Every structure is written in C-alpha cells, then in structure tokens.
Image (tube, helix red, strand yellow):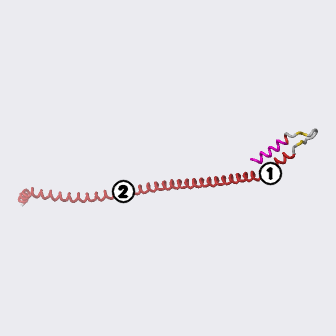
Amino acid sequence: MDVIDRIQGAVNLVEQARSVPLSASCVVHRGELLELLDQASHAFPKDLATAQGIIATREKILEEARESADSIIERAREEVARMVSQTEIVAAARAESKRILAEVQADAKEQRAEIEKYIDSRLATLEVILNKTLDVVERGREKLEGAGDKDALSELAD
C-alpha cells in the first residue's frame, strides 16, 4: 500500500535525523517530512477506498459462502429425510407384503382343506354307490348260480 510506504518513510526520516544534544528532540528537514506526509495524505483516500472495497468484497464472499453452505445443508437434510422416508416406505411395503403373503397362504390352506373335504365326500358317496352296485351284482350272480339249487331245496321242502 502506498500510504504505508509513505508513513514508513516518515518514520525512517525521524529515526535517522540528528538528535539535539541533551534532549529527546531531533532535527528533521521540514520540507522532506511535509512532502512525505502530503503524499501519504493524498494516497490515503485511494488506499482507504481500496481497503474498504476489499473488505466489502470479503464480506460479500463470506455471505455468499454462508448462503451456499446453508443451501447445501438444507439439501442434505432434505435428502436425508427423503432417504429415511424411502426406508420407512420400503419397510412398510415389506411388512405389508409379508402380511398379504401370510393371508394368501392361510386362504390357500383353508381352500385346500375345503377342496379335500369335498373330494373326500364325493369319493365316499361314490364308494357307497359302488358298494351297493357290487352287492346288487353279487346277489344277481348268486341268483344266477343258485337258481337251480334253490329250486331243488324248495322241492324238498315241499
């Protein structure tokens, strides 16, 4: 910075100046010191404006960084919430699918039992019909075989 260089030059001028014997004073060339201070005072507004611009830019950059960080954090929170929500949805869907599967399996077991019961009753009915048919066939065969014997016995009884 130009102002700092000018002020440092003034300090150097005072440090290198001849001292007044028996005092803390020194002899400084008035023209040189005034010229350095005048240059510093002219450069000061320019350097001050530059410094203020740098500070304003820094504040703007910091504010943008804060906003960007806040935005990133908000998006991350939304993403976490979405992922948690999806995890909850998946867990709920799995639980629901297990419930539905258990329900379907119970229905299938019940229907199988009903079908087996129906088939068993139909087979029992068929068995009864077949047994009766078999009895009729046996009696018919016995009649055919024993028609002659029964006639002989009926004759003896007479």
Q: Position of residue 98 (x, y in %)?
A: 44, 54
Q: Position of residue 85 (x, y in %)?
A: 52, 56
The tag on residue 41 is 1
Q: Is residue 10 magenta?
A: yes
Mark 1 or 2: in front is 1
Left or right: residue 56 compared with residue 112: right
Report crowding for label 1: few under 14, some 14 to 19, many 20 or more residues within 10 A (C-alpha): some
Left or right: residue 55 compared with residue 105: right
Instruction: Read off the magenta span.
Output: 1-13
* Quadrant position of residue 25: top right
Left or right: residue 25 compared with residue 95: right
Q: Nearer the viewer, residue 13 or 104?
A: 13
Q: Which residue is mark 2?
A: 108
Which residue sits at x=57%, y=55%?
A: 75
* Quadrant position of residue 14: top right
The amino acid at mark 1 is: Ser
